[in-house]
Image: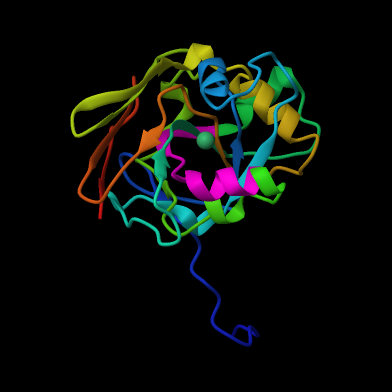
Amino acid sequence: MSDFVIAPSPVAALPVQGGGRFPVRRVYCIGRNYAAHAVEMGHDPNREPPFFFQKNPDNLDPSGSFPYPGQSADVHHEVELAVALGQGGADIPLESALAHVWGYAVALDMTRRDVQDEAKRLKRPWDTSKAFEHSAPIGPLVPAAGFDPSKGAISLAVNDEVRQSGDLDQMIWKVPEMIAYLSTWFTLAPGDVILSGTPAGVGPVVRGDRMAARIAGLPPLDVRVV
Ligand code: MN
């Protein structure tokens, strides 16, 4: 018998290609991790220390539908490589960081850009622009052994028009560096998911749009804006 005084929420979980589910603990996201995207957002692309924000575990949504959120008239797509950790730790050495990865997936960091712009202007946090319901559509996870996160085409098309097109090798902070650095700020744990930033070309979607997110070597992610 549980001694919880209310029913606990279900564990957020991601489908794994070939079967099974990956239970999610936390979701970390890196900002401005592709130089061309940093430039398009008005920032210096030089290698400053990375910064992170968080989404909620239950914002991850494998359903293939993205309900357009309220409180915004400018919601942008950001296609990103998702990195799912099977092992955690604090102060993880760079050399062993990749061994902490359980698997990879294609994800979207959907963003209320108008709300984020206002937050930046007022020096307020990003939660309402980033960590809202259904804000992280995600495809099936693939075990790490079958995928090299250091290179490979990453793209996003809206209604068959390519909007974002880049390569994982354009990341300013590579996947092992992100894990090692993040673990100096947070104690990472199995179930943590890291969204690794987006290439240039972010832009708005409207209801009815079809988003096709692709990373070479990973299952495709197709999402309808509803
Ligand atoms: Mn992002």
Q: Is residue 131 left or right of residue 157?
A: right
**Residue 187 visible in image:** yes
Give the percent coordinates (x, y) of residue 169. Answer: 50, 12
At x 61%, y 19%, the residue is: 174
Residue 217 vertical position relative to residue 15 in the rendered view, above or below = above
Q: Quadrant of the C terminus?
A: bottom left
Colour scheme of the picture: rainbow
Give the percent coordinates (x, y) of residue 149. Answer: 49, 20
125 or 152: nearer the eye? 125
At x 52%, y 13%, the residue is: 170
117 or 51: nearer the eye? 117
Q: Magenta span covers which residues?
A: 102-120
16 or 119: nearer the eye? 119
Q: Is residue 201 left or right of residue 31?
A: left
| Circle count | 0
At x 43%, y 34%, the residue is: 78
Q: Quadrant of the N terminus?
A: bottom right
Give the percent coordinates (x, y) of residue 191. Answer: 57, 47
**Residue 130 visible in image:** no
Residue 207 vertical position relative to residue 51 in the rendered view, above or below = below
Residue 150 vertical position relative to residue 114 in the rendered view, above or below = above
Give the percent coordinates (x, y) of residue 118. Answer: 59, 48
Q: Is residue 1 magenta?
A: no
Q: Is residue 11 left or right of residue 220?
A: right
50 or 147: nearer the eye? 50
Q: Residue 88 occupies which quadrant of the picture?
A: top right
At x 27%, y 49%, the residue is: 64
Residue 126 vertical position relative to residue 40 in the rendered view, above or below = below
Q: Is residue 110 magenta?
A: yes
Q: Residue 32 occupies which quadrant of the picture?
A: top right
